[in-house]
Amino acid sequence: MYLDDVITRVKARNPGQDLFIQAVEEVLESLAPVIKEHPSIEKLNLLERLTEPERQVLFRVAWVDDNGDVQVNRGFRVGFNSGLGPYKGGLRFHPSVTLSVIKFLAFEQIFKNSLTGLLIGGGKGGSDFDPRGRSDGEVMRFCQSFMSELFRHIGDQTDVPAGDIGVGSREIGYLFGMYKKLTNRYELGTLTGKGTDWGGSHGRTEATGFGCVYFAREMLAMKEESLEGKVCVVSGSGNVALYAIRKIIDLGGRVVACSQSDGFLFDPNGLDFDALRMIKEVERERLQKYVDLYPRAEFRAGEKVWDVVCDAAFPCATQNEIMKEDAELLVENGCRLVCEGANMPTHPEALKVFQKAGVLFGPGKAANAGGVAVSAMEMQQNAGWQSWSFDEVDKELRRVMHGIHDTCLKHSAYFGREGDYVMGANIGGFLRVAEAMKAMGVL
């Protein structure tokens, strides 16, 4: 069978890249009914072409730390598919970054970007550099070295990086400054996630977290429910998690827990968003500091946030953070909705548990597309030398998330799996890219 043959070839070509292979299998296994209905997919070998990146760049990043010692990291940029527009996807700075991680993220980005309905292709990049604990000077020198290679591969009509884990407005500023120096051009649209005073978009910081919660609201509305009064848990405490927490609270939910790498914070009365934001964004401290402000709260070291009884869970940290046993515990504790704010945070075996239990499940390539949607809006604003208000951006974000939700429902219903958001997202994202690839010939 064509589908099985493609998966076999992907595994043979990418030994040891487990995350990338997992992402490919998850998407391709949803496409069996599409292939049956559209024989041109096999004739043009679209699946094998889709699973092979158009370009992969791996480079050395040498820089000098505050002690005068030379450090060496790896830099990556993968442009996976440009059928719908220039490559678009974030840069991740984290010790866990490998080629497999970047390829899985870039592959996911193809479908996520397609679902937005905007003209952006799929790409991703980053480094195994860890900005935590580094001074501003060290981060600046690393970013400048990183951009001294990356600059030759990007541009507003070619590849437009943004932020991701470990890359915020500080890092984007250093990267853009070096790009400007090397090219002698003030090309705002080459990087997104910039400060709002110099070409960034209002609402970009909030976009991924807000978008995830907007998608959850759409799913609940189909059941004539809302987030009002629901007890929620959110994994992570970075940008996506923080603004998912804020929007859940705005919509009447109560978030009782969030997490970091060494445990989770639990507040039975509901987390105080303003206190969390101050601790994480301003002071750059760990969650344990929250307990100093609210003694009723507790930090549970070494434990997973999925142990908390809840109505809804929002995984907003990293890939494969919900394993089968976590899913079983969530179901046992009454969780009826899981909406992914991170990229592929739910392991395939955990997904089966949720689907069997009838849990509403919003996959990341649909639910966390809000960030890249607003990044594309930033590109639009830069192209016209405009600045939209926060309300304008938020209104457009809600429109995009509503459209993604409708796309998922339409395609899942058409292929006999109504309400299967995973299948609907994969098919909806694939078909738009496939049509572009067919129109442009064999490249």
Image (tube, rainbow, N blue to C red):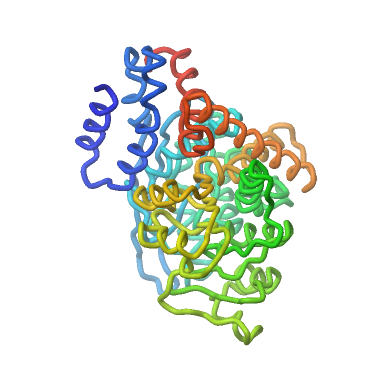
Q: Is residue 89 above or below residue 349?
A: above
The residue drawn where x is 57% and y is 32% is 409
Nearest the viewer among 103 and 311 is 311
| Image label count | 0
Identify which residue, 195 or 240, lies in the foreground.
240
Task: Find residue 190 and report its image quarter.
Answer: top right
Residue 156, x across and y down, in percent: 57, 33
Q: Residue at x 70, y 46 (%)?
A: 201
Considering only vertical position in the picture, is 120 above or below 254?
above
Q: Residue at x 66, y 72 (%)?
A: 270
Q: Nearer the viewer, residue 90 or 400?
A: 400
Asked whether residue 186 appears in the rendered view, the answer is: no
How far across and down, in percent of the image, does residue 50 sit? 37, 27
Is 151 on the left or on the right of 407, as rendered?
A: left
Image quadrant containing the N terminus:
top left
Q: Viewer-proximal residue, 4 or 228?
A: 228
Whole-percent x, y for residue 176 in the image: 58, 48
Screen quadrant of the C terminus: top left
Q: Is residue 307 visible?
A: yes
Residue drawn at x 59%, y 40% is 184
| Image x and y of residue 297, in percent | 60, 81
